[in-house]
């Protein structure tokens, strides 16, 4: 069966096809739902949302444990025309409230585990709050079907992505964006009814929703949602479920390299997918040797709908992030102009066309007929494979999670002793990058690392904690008076060498 255009159509077709309807679509914590049962639960939940007064276009946020109920709410929001975002369970309440208020959200759905924090977020952001007593498959009654019919340019998801400073930006992803992403993945890394994917990545990121929930369900695969990633647990879960596909970030695979992988764990495994952060060539080779299957590396950004390039099983190039997916436009532009470079020259990776998202909430829409510059540098080889060479942006990617240096700096400046701060990324073998800070102190005062991290933890998630902090008399500046982050990055490497 081919992949239909919009997700709702593809999902409904799977659920209504006799040979597919009884197959398992989703499992979590012992709960197993067939395609037909999951589709009924989603439509019933969408009707409940509509009955509560929510109207198509109303933005809703979810704060729940990883469960079948969370997946149902994600799918129901899409079915009801309610743009959704999933909040990280590790996110500080003030951080969540600020970004939801700024992006004009109106409703928050939490489970009992997060009821207290949900009340704080809803109060501070001015949201209506819904507390679900049971997030499982508890949607009784007749299902009449949601009346909402999506158009390709209708907003479907809001995914928050960190900028180099200020609040996270709310990226508006359309139903058409999702369809194009799914079609591209089904071409490069196709899945089918015999595939079983273990889901461990956060629902707060595009990969967790688009590539590990929507795309597999549109293609008829089975998704098993795990509560968290822990090395020993994941290996035993691989033995138990015998997946055909696992998807993760380099940090996850780095940790799995330290574990023994029984033959039963990889008995059906046919590929490992890796994205969201750079993967070193030598690490890729070690992972492939450890698991005995290919590592399929892909690349993309939230603003360009998750996946723009991907390798394919049997046709991957080591060190590359693959070729551009069908229906997407990619060019390498000169860093200082819109001139396309040729002959394998390095430049800024740029995207154009239908893969580009609608825009940021509260800001003018993206112009899809113009190049969206990613901030990443790379080159194309003669076969069209993209090789990344670095980043223009200052984002720190810690274990696949994007951290904004500016937000950490804002938190540090709340400490009474800190007069100025600059945060940069330091390479880390396990996590890829970790944040370190350089600070100017007021009047001969002192600050310890634990103190700094306590201030950060009060405002941001634990992943924003510093690996180290360095006190300087004056932060270095460049010719235009801006803090020279590159110089500080070099200083950090020198401070930690050996």
Image (spheres, rainbow, N blue to C red):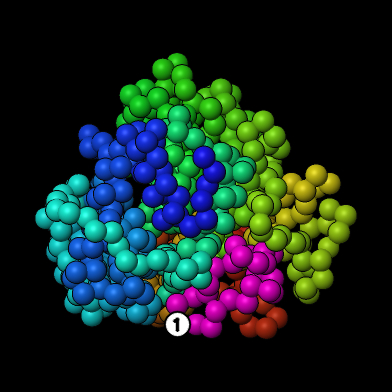
Around disc 1, counting alpha carbons within 10 Å, would you say few (fewer than 14), some (14 to 19), or many (20 or more)?
few
* Residue corresponding to mark 1: 362
Residue interval drawn in magenta: 350-375
Work out whether 362 lies above or below 492.
below
Relative placement, left or right, of 366 versus 450 is right
Residue 477 at x, y percent in the picture: 63, 77
Is 372 colored magenta in this rendering? yes
Work out whether 235 lies above or below 80.
above
Q: Which residue lies furthest to the top in this view?
A: 263
Q: Residue furthest right?
A: 343
Foreground pick, 285 / 201: 201
Residue visible at 52% across and 40% down in the picture: 1
Residue 175 at x, y percent in the picture: 47, 63
Foreground pick, 392 / 325: 325
Residue 291 at x, y percent in the picture: 52, 25
Q: Main secondary structure of the magenta part?
A: loop
Residue visible at 55% across and 79% down in the picture: 365
Q: In which quarter of the image is the C terminus?
A: top right
Q: What element carries label 1?
A: loop
């Amino acid at each position: 069966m081919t992949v239909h255009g919009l997700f709702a159509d593809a999902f409904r077709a799977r659920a209504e096809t006799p040979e597919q309807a009884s197959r398992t679509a989703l499992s979590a914590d012992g709960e197993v739902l067939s395609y037909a049962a999951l589709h009924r639960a989603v439509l019933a939940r969408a009707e409940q949302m509509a009955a509560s007064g929510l109207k198509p276009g109303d933005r809703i946020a979810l704060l729940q444990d990883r469960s079948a109920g969370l997946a149902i709410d994600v799918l129901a929001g899409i079915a009801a025309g309610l743009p959704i975002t999933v909040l990280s369970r590790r996110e500080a309440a003030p951080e969540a409230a600020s970004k939801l208020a700024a992006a004009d959200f109106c409703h928050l759905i939490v489970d009992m585990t997060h009821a207290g924090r949900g009340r704080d977020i809803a109060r501070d952001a001015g949201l209506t709050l819904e507390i679900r007593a049971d997030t499982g498959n508890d949607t009784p009654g007749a299902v009449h079907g949601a009346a909402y019919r999506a158009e390709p340019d209708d907003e479907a998801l809001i995914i928050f992505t960190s900028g180099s400073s200020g609040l996270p930006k709310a990226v508006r992803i359309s139903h058409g964006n999702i369809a194009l992403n799914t079609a591209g993945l089904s071409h490069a890394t196709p899945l089918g009814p015999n595939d079983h994917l273990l889901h461990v990545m956060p629902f707060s990121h595009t990969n967790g929703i688009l590539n590990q929930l929507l795309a597999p369900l549109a293609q008829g695969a089975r998704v098993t949602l795990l509560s968290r990633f822990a090395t020993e647990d994941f290996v035993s879960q691989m033995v138990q479920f015998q997946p055909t596909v696992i998807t993760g970030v380099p940090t996850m695979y780095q940790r799995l390299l330290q574990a023994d992988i029984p033959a039963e764990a990889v008995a059906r495994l046919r590929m490992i997918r890796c994205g969201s952060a750079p993967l070193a060539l030598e690490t890729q080779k070690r992972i492939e040797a450890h698991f005995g299957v290919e590592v399929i590396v892909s690349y993309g950004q939230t603003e360009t709908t998750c996946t723009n390039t991907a390798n394919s099983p049997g046709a991957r190039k080591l060190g590359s992030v693959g070729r551009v997916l069908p229906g997407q436009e990619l060019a390498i532009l000169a860093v200082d102009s819109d001139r396309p470079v040729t002959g394998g020259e390095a430049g800024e990776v740029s995207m154009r066309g239908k893969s580009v998202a609608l825009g940021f909430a509260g800001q003018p829409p993206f112009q899809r007929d113009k190049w969206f510059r990613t901030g990443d540098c790379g080159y194309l080889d003669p076969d069209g494979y993209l090789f990344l060479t670095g980043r223009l942006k200052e984002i720190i990617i810690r274990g696949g999670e994007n951290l904004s240096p500016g937000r950490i700096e804002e938190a540090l400046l709340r400490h009474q002793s800190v007069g100025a701060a600059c945060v940069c990324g330091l390479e880390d073998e396990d996590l890829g990058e970790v944040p370190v800070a350089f600070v100017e102190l007021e009047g001969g005062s002192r600050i310890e690392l634990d103190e700094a991290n306590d201030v950060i933890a009060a405002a941001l998630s634990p992943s924003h904690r510093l690996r180290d902090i360095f006190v300087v008399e004056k932060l270095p500046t460049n010719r235009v008076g801006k803090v020279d982050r590159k110089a500080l990055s070099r200083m950090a490497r020198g401070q930690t060498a050996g």
